[in-house]
Image (cartoon, grey):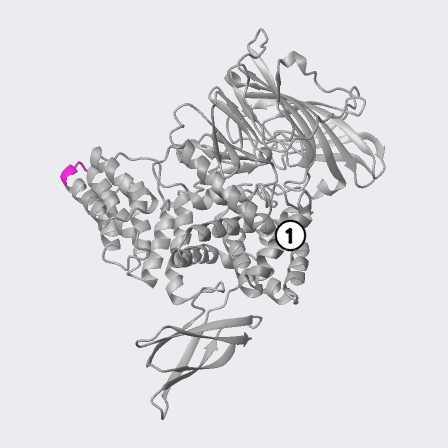
Amino acid sequence: MINKKTLIPAAIVLLTLASGAFGQTEEGANLDILRYKINAELLPDSHTLKAQTQVTFKALKQTQSAVFEMNGSLIISSVKGPDGKTALQFIQDRVNDLNVRVNLGQLYEAGAEITLTFEYAGPLATPEGGPVPDRKLAYVGPEGCYLFYASRWFPFHGYASDRALSEITFTVPNNWTVTGHSAAPVVIGTPSSLPAPTGSQTATAPPKLAGAQTATPPKSTATTKDNRKTFTFVETEPVLPGSFAAGPFITRTISSGGFQIDLNVLPGSEARIEEFGREIAQMLQFYSTRFSPYPYGPRFLVAEIDDESLDSYSGTGILFLPHYQLVSEKSLPIDDIAREVAYQWWGQSVGMKSFDDVWLSQGLAQYSSVLYRESQQSQAEFQGTLSEIIELALAFEQEASISRAPAQLNDQSPAYRSVIFYKGAYVFNMLRGTIGDEKFFNLIKTYYTTFKGRNAGIDDFESLAEKAAGANLRGFFGLWVDSTGVPEFKVDYAIIRTKEGKFKVRGTVRQNLDSFRGPVTLALEAEGSKEMKTTIDLKGTSADFEISSESKPLDVIVDPENRYLRISESLRSSVVVRRGIQHFQREEYAEAEEQFIAALKINPRSSWAWYNRGLLYMEQRNWQKARSDGFDQVLVGDLEPAWLEVWSYIYRGNCYDAEGQRERAVAEYDKARDNGNDYNGAQKAVEKYKAQPFKRERSSSASN
């Protein structure tokens, strides 16, 4: 699936298509694709893909036409009917809907199986023709190639929902490797040994073999006169096919935790292969224990792509990572990689009935990442993670409900990510808190085993959740999935001293949503005693409480463990900062500055707001202002979170370096070293900049 950062820094312009970048057409329900047979040739010097694709599908309704989605850069030269000879009429829209409408030449009844053969070719060098206007999802060039399922480099329909069998053959330069998942051994040969499909041929699958196979060529491989060879990949179970990478890869295998991670990188990107491989193996092991065994065998593929694509992308059995991540000196982007690995369960193995159900994939993958972080963190660190997710979830919460976001929001917009990824993840966390850990994790396992290899909808998940909970959860799903708005808790109380010299706290908890129902925890802080907790059943907008204490009460805290997604005075500033970060990542600098200033009006001591303001001015090469109106203010602010201090010293040093004040820069790096915090590779950065002066690199907006 597709992602954009915390890890996913991509300045993506909103699409005009109502269905979004990765949505699907309404007419797709008329057919069900059964299998593909594709012969594709990659011509790197001309950035060209040439292909013949045979599509076999079942008509779900009586029809004499079929509509497929297709990349607009690829020009279809012919579509032939089931006999492999009769040319059919078609219309290709290469600009707006990115589809091809085929007149089948006769009326077919529901249930009929039909095979069409498409011939097409075209350049894949820029985002033009693809579903995302400023990011490449498919590329062919001298340095390498990548083809994402989402790029629509072959005719398909029903994004992320229509699975199919496949046999896909690539012809490539002799010094190239092609990597992608195959449920059967990858066949390597000469182009002439694999005839193009004709007539109504169907792919004959070899014996089933589980596991992702990296197509690493043997030492001696037959070649043709033009020095080219072929790789053939076969899927014997229906999947979302078509995600591959090719190039002069260096392939390294990391074996860890019962998994083999095959990492395919270009020369110069090998330094951190083992670190990436071992972390990914640990993620696979964790998810296999939490959910169910990894669905694609003991091997997992990683392939390098360029920095002009997405910041990560997951296909069946394969993860694509850009060059800059593989060579970065900062800590691994654990949150983002863990989310991408989780898509193997939620999106690849368990699919969606339609794009409207995408919360079940993207929200659950994001929450899987949260669970992985929880397994690696202390309780205090995990509370920080939940606070981060809350801020991201609230940034655009009012834009659309989770169930309506796929239809109302562009799926590459910050608002969509906020609602589907982060609010979506937090809803799973709240469901866990509502029904308890044991029932929640049993529910997730049941959901996976029930729908493995199938497609599910939100209604299906709600039904399973009610069975797991043994209770009606319509109120929960109605409030958090079907509606917008979050509660804001406020508490009024009085402290009463008893005749025995003890204390009672009597008060009322209020919140603003009539539809809210649920248990709410209250924590009482008192002098010289541990925190005392009580739980009230809040139905509607208010409920009374009473807490007894041996010691003098100091404060009453509502929902201290962040069970509910909610707004508060302390959160308002951070939420506005998150909006500013989204503008910053899209290079909308004036809008970003406006949001940071607005956040500081709410909380003038917000180090988080000052810090991002400093990063903004650094991006604009305004070094003095980055210090004075950014990092200097961070250090006299609230320093929440604590790692802002060490990175502010580092960035102040960078600013001095950029101005040629080396001695002052080194003094700042020494302060960062003495601070000792190593968040996101801070100490390695200190060593680097002490050894040689800072030079402006790729934007680091919100990268910490």
Q: Is residue 622 above or below residue 419?
A: above
Q: Residue at x 42, y 56 (%)?
A: 382
Location of residue 32 (image quadrant): top right
Between 178 and 139, the one nearer to me in the picture: 178
Relative to 358, 608 lies left or right: left
Q: Is residue 688 above or below residue 376?
A: above
The question of residue 662 being in magenta is answered with yes
Q: Is residue 216 above or below residue 455?
A: above
Q: Is residue 235 above or below residue 197?
A: below
What span is in magenta?
659-663
Amino acid carrying mark 1 in the image: Tyr
Whole-percent x and y of residue 439? Answer: 60, 60
Relative to 311, 604 lies left or right: left
Main SS of residues in magenta: loop
Q: Residue at x 29, y 43 (%)?
A: 682
Q: Residues within 10 Å of mark 1 (few under 14, many from 20)?
A: some
Q: Residue at x 32, y 81 (%)?
A: 552
Q: Quadrant of the N terminus?
A: top right
Between 67 and 267, the one nearer to me in the picture: 267
Between 298 and 94, the one nearer to me in the picture: 298
Relative to 217, 555 lies left or right: left
Q: Is residue 504 visible to the viewer in this orientation of the structure?
A: yes
Q: Residue at x 24, y 37 (%)?
A: 687
Whole-percent x and y of residue 132? Answer: 53, 37
Q: Which residue is mark 1?
A: 447
Between 89 and 327, the one nearer to me in the picture: 327
Describe the element under mark 1 as helix, strand or loop.
helix
Relative to 603, 208 lies left or right: right
Q: Is residue 481 visible to the viewer in this orientation of the structure?
A: no
